[in-house]
Amino acid sequence: MLHPLRIIKANRWSGFLAVQLFVAGNLVSAIINPLMWQIFVMWLTWRPPILTQLTPEAILYLNMFALVFGNLFFMGMLMIGPLKRGWSELSVYGLTRACISVAYPPRRL
């Protein structure tokens, strides 16, 4: 952000904070997502006792539900965005982008 004071004057503090939380929330969720998938797969395959000691099993099931359906919702949003703009041919790329970004993260040049 080049001129934060201009943005604060134009949108007040509430608009400024909303934009900051929106950008930071996307970044944090993108960073935490692979870790959550690893914990989920570890719990699903081995059921380690440390996870059941740290959290009750009901919480683990709720987290599994949120992880799976949250990612499905995210992929749906990536497909709906182009459709709302009239770019129906790009809608399929939203799905592939969501799947490929997990398998092949972008590299710096």
Image: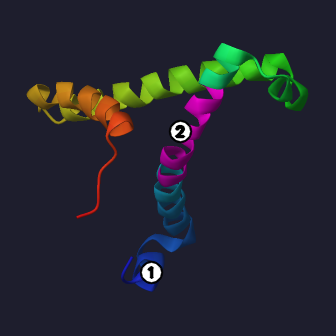
The secondary structure that dominates the magenta segment is helix
Type of amino acid at the residue the image marks with label 1: Pro
Q: Nearer the viewer, residue 25 or 51?
A: 51
Residue stretch rendered in magenta on the structure? 27-40
Q: How is the image coloured?
A: rainbow
SS category of the residue bearing label 1: helix
Disc ID at residue 31:
none
Q: Is residue 60 left or right of residue 32?
A: right
Name the residue tied to disc 1.
Answer: 4
How many numbered callouts? 2
- Whether residue 33 appears in magenta in the rendering, the answer is yes
x, y percent for residue 31: 52, 49
Q: Residue sitting at 46 percent across and 57 percent down?
A: 23
User: In which quadrant will I find the C terminus?
Assistant: bottom left
Residue lying at 46% horizontally and 84% vertically, measured from the top left: 5
Question: Which is nearer the N-term, disc 1 or disc 2?
Answer: 1
Residue 30 position within the rendered picture, expressed as x and y whole percent measured from the top left: 48, 46
Identify whether 50 is placed above or below 17.
above
Binning the other alpha carbons within 10 Å of mark 1 as few (below 14), some (14 to 19) or many (20 upward) gives: few
Asked which quadrant contains residue 50, the reply is: top right
In the picture, measured across the screen, residue 88 lies left or right of residue 96, that is left
Which quadrant: the N terminus?
Answer: bottom left
Relative to 24, is 83 above or below? above
Residue at the spot 85% in from the left edge and 23% down from the top edge: 49
Q: Position of residue 85 (x, y in %)?
A: 17, 36
| The label number, if any, that marks residue 33 in the structure image | 2
Residue occupying the point 34% across, 45% down: 105
Q: Position of residue 66 (x, y in %)?
A: 61, 24
